[in-house]
């Protein structure tokens, strides 16, 4: 017998096959509790995660951690987790944008209503064409910004029953201005 001692051979880890009914970042078949805990540490380290950093934090041999990570698909699973989190962030962001747009729409409608009330109480001759155009443009610009670009509209089509009070007030004011202009000709 030789005086040299043999190092124990590490057995090769069987590659993980992701369970189809589990999220990739959940514990997978064949993954031991310690391996899953190491993966969670890697995952919870965020987007700046590294194998070397995980090995150092866990006080494990970096080559061993790389071998476990390769067999247990850490990189692919972490990427799936990151995409999932990005999707959640996107949904939350969209919801916040909708809430902000709703609040802005309420403010805009209230302001436009006040402007329309004031305009309705004025003699149309007191409002120059330029003043009216500036007010109308400001309201419509804010509406377009809030609601997005309008689709092409045929000017000869009458307004449907979906018109708002503000729409009716603006149309009424335009009619009054047309009547005043017609009287000056």
Image (cartoon, rainbow, N blue to C red):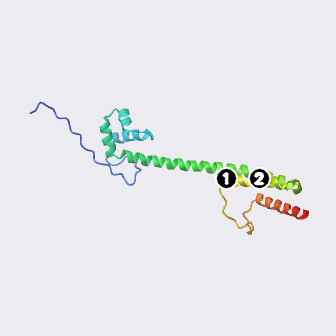
Say which quadrant the N terminus sits in. Answer: top left
Q: Which residue matches tag 1? A: 146
Percent coordinates x, y for residue 154 in the rendering: 71, 67
Residue at the farthest bottom position: 156
Look at 76% across and 50% down and name the residue there: 111
Q: Which residue matches tag 2? A: 112
N-terminal of the two: label 1 or label 2? 2
Can residue 17 be spotted in the picture?
A: yes
Q: Quadrant of residue 13?
A: top left
Q: Quadrant of residue 164?
A: bottom right
Callout 1 environment at 10 Å: few (<14), some (14 to 19), or many (20+)? some
Look at 39% across and 47% down and name the residue there: 77
Find numbered disc 1 in the image and state the secondary structure of the residue it sits on: helix
Percent coordinates x, y for residue 43 in the rendering: 42, 41
- Above or below — where is 135 with respect to 60? below
Q: Quadrant of residue 37?
A: top left
Cα gap from disc 1 to disc 2, whole angstroms: 14 Å
Percent coordinates x, y for residue 45 in the rendering: 43, 38
Can residue 26 be spotted in the picture?
A: no
Say which quadrant the C terminus sits in. Answer: bottom right
Percent coordinates x, y for residue 105 in the rendering: 70, 52
């Amino acid at each position: 017998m030789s005086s040299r001692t043999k190092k124990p051979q590490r057995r090769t880890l069987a590659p993980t096959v992701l369970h189809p009914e589990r999220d990739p970042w959940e514990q997978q078949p064949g993954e031991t509790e310690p391996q899953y805990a190491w993966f969670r540490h890697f995952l919870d380290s965020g987007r700046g995660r590294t194998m070397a950093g995980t090995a150092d934090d866990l006080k494990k041999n970096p080559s061993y951690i790389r071998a476990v990570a390769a067999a247990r698909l850490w990189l692919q699973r972490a990427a799936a987790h990151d995409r999932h989190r990005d999707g959640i962030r996107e949904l939350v962001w969209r919801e916040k944008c909708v809430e902000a747009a709703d609040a802005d729409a309420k403010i805009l409608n209230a302001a436009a209503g006040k402007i329309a009330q004031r305009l309705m109480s004025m003699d149309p001759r007191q409002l120059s064409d330029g003043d009216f155009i500036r007010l109308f443009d400001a309201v419509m610009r804010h509406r377009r910004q809030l609601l997005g670009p309008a689709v092409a509209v045929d000017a000869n089509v009458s307004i449907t029953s979906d018109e708002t009070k503000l729409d009716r007030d603006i149309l009424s004011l335009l009619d009054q201005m047309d009547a005043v202009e017609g009287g000056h000709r």
